[in-house]
Image (cartoon, grey):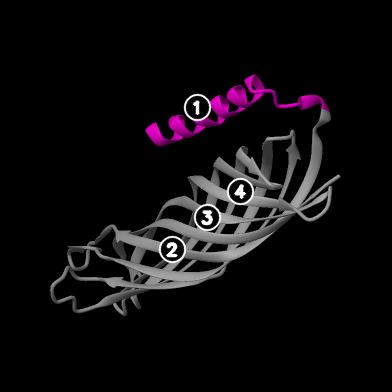
Amino acid sequence: MKIKLLAVATLATLATTAQAQGVNWSTARFYLGAEIGQSYTSMDSGGFNTLGPHLNTNDDKNHNTMYAIKAGVDMGRLRFDLGYREYDRDKYTTDSFQPPVPTFFYASKIKTKAWMLSAYYDFIEYNKFAFYGGLGIGQARTHVSTNDTVVQGSGSDTNFSWQGELGVAYPLTNALHINGGYRYVDLGKTKINLSAIGGGAPAGDFSADLKSNEFFLGLRYKF
């Protein structure tokens, strides 16, 4: 809850500060954008297997391709946009039994899509280059399926998501800009129910907490 309130407050402060520094709202231009990049995602597993009984533990990392489209409004040094982002399906392996000698391993497949409302501010402009920072809040829809050969589970959840971003943009023309940078995204925690393979008896739950470090390249066209 503290992170949610901090993200919302920071977005509001960014807009107020930018306006005070002379952002020209009367010359706002709409834009469309697209991005492609690499997502380096970490997954922390949790939950409790009642057939063990034991905690689900450990974490794993993976990297894959990320795609995004967005629509927004450009007001000079300040921009707002609403973006849709999709991540390729990732595979993770985590401990079923606690270390140091896990007997079984969860093989998990995870697919995530996210909507993000973001604000960006160009804090340095130099020789046509604009160095900017941004913050976004939104929702991530994650589907998780997992199996350790004894229990299995599958399901989806919608979670609060937030991001911080640093990047640089350069105008190729008056309307077309290229940009690239780095962002950190918290995609939230998804929890699914487990059941015994074969019998189908309830077997507790499994959770996947996802965080992503992303490097991206994008184009933005202003109308």
Q: Are marks 4 and 1 in contact (CB under 8 Å)?
A: no
Q: Nearer the viewer, residue 160 or 75?
A: 75
Tag 4 residue? 115
Q: Main secondary structure of the magenta part?
A: helix
The local secondary structure at tag 1 comes to helix
The mark nearer the N terminus, 3 or 2, is 2
Q: Earlier in the sequence, mark 4 or mark 2?
A: 2
Q: CA distance from mark 3 to mark 4?
A: 18 Å
How packed mark 3 is, by other alpha carbons closer than 10 Å (few <14, some 14-19, many 20 or more), is some
Q: Residue furthest top?
A: 20
Q: CA distance from mark 1 to mark 3?
A: 22 Å
Question: Is label 2 in a helix, a strand or a loop?
Answer: strand
Marks 2,1: beta carbons within 8 A: no
| Three-letter residue code for mark 4 | Trp
Earlier-in-chain disc, 4 versus 1: 1
Q: Earlier in the sequence, mark 3 or mark 4?
A: 4
